[in-house]
Image: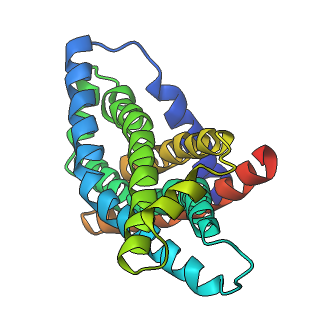
Amino acid sequence: MKLISHFGKYILMLKGMFSKPENGKLYWKEFMHQCNEIGIGSLGIVTIISVFMGAVSAVQTSYQLVSPVIPRSTIAQIVRDTVILEFAPTLVCIVLAGVIGSKIASELGNMRVSEQIDALEIMGINTKTYLIMPKVAAALITLPLLIIIAMVLGIWGGRFAGSMSGILSPYIFDTGLMKDFVPYNVLFALIKGYTFSFLISTISAYFGYYVSGGSLEIGRSATRSVVVSCIMILLADYILAAILL
């Protein structure tokens, strides 16, 4: 029953987000602020993770492909498909669930505990639209862009690691990179990216918006938001793979 109650409140929160803004300029300013916080603020960690993710993938793939029958360019194919299909959208979003999700939940939780949300509602402002919708919209725009950056950097990291360690030359890597490329894989990764972005932003906003109690509950709600977001990302990853692949 508790799970059904949480799901019902979650749906009502989503329904409450879609209403006409009271002040378009104010909402646009908040939206741009969230794009900067969510997108630009996460660029550093995404860059580091992506480069090392591709590098490790290339080295470990080379370690497993010991047969002389298999061409070395196959390493590039495996790195490319692994990064595009799984590492860039799923692994990056799991990390961002901890970075972005905890931030959103803590921010909204602090506003709830300090009664700032109650004050905004007394002034006649739809807090679900003003506080949650810009965060969700910013996540839907910036996170897929971060995933595209992660794809590029992950493949470059694999190419760099292969060249520096002597596993395969840049020419052989580029040859394998272009061989049997399926453009649909990029579309599938972006579909996963938009789905995961929506889950991260809305679940974190839900746990932060409905915090009850004192300041200790803020940390607990942030932790719960990260755990639930990661579980839902993995579940959605399986469902999307089963349906679309």
Image location (x, y in percent) of residue 74: 64, 67
- Does any portion of residue 207 appear in the rendered image? no
Residue at 40% in and 33% down: 141
Image height of 55 relative to 95, above or below: below
Image location (x, y in percent) of residue 98: 38, 63
Image location (x, y in percent) of residue 235: 67, 59
Q: Quadrant of residue 140?
A: top left
Image height of 188 relative to 234, above or below: above
- Identify the coloring: rainbow
Q: Quadrant of residue 78?
A: bottom right
Residue at 76% in and 44% down: 244
Taking depth in this image into account, of 132 and 197 the one nearest to the observer is: 197
Image height of 168 relative to 40, above or below: below
Residue at 29% in and 22% down: 125
Image height of 129 relative to 56, above or below: above
Residue at 57% in and 43% down: 195
Taking depth in this image into account, of 61 and 124 the one nearest to the observer is: 61
- Does any portion of residue 172 appear in the rendered image? yes
Q: How many marks?
A: 0
Image location (x, y in percent) of residue 186: 59, 43
Position of 81 with respect to 101 (left or right) is right
Taking depth in this image into account, of 151 and 7 the one nearest to the observer is: 151
Q: Quadrant of the N terminus?
A: bottom right
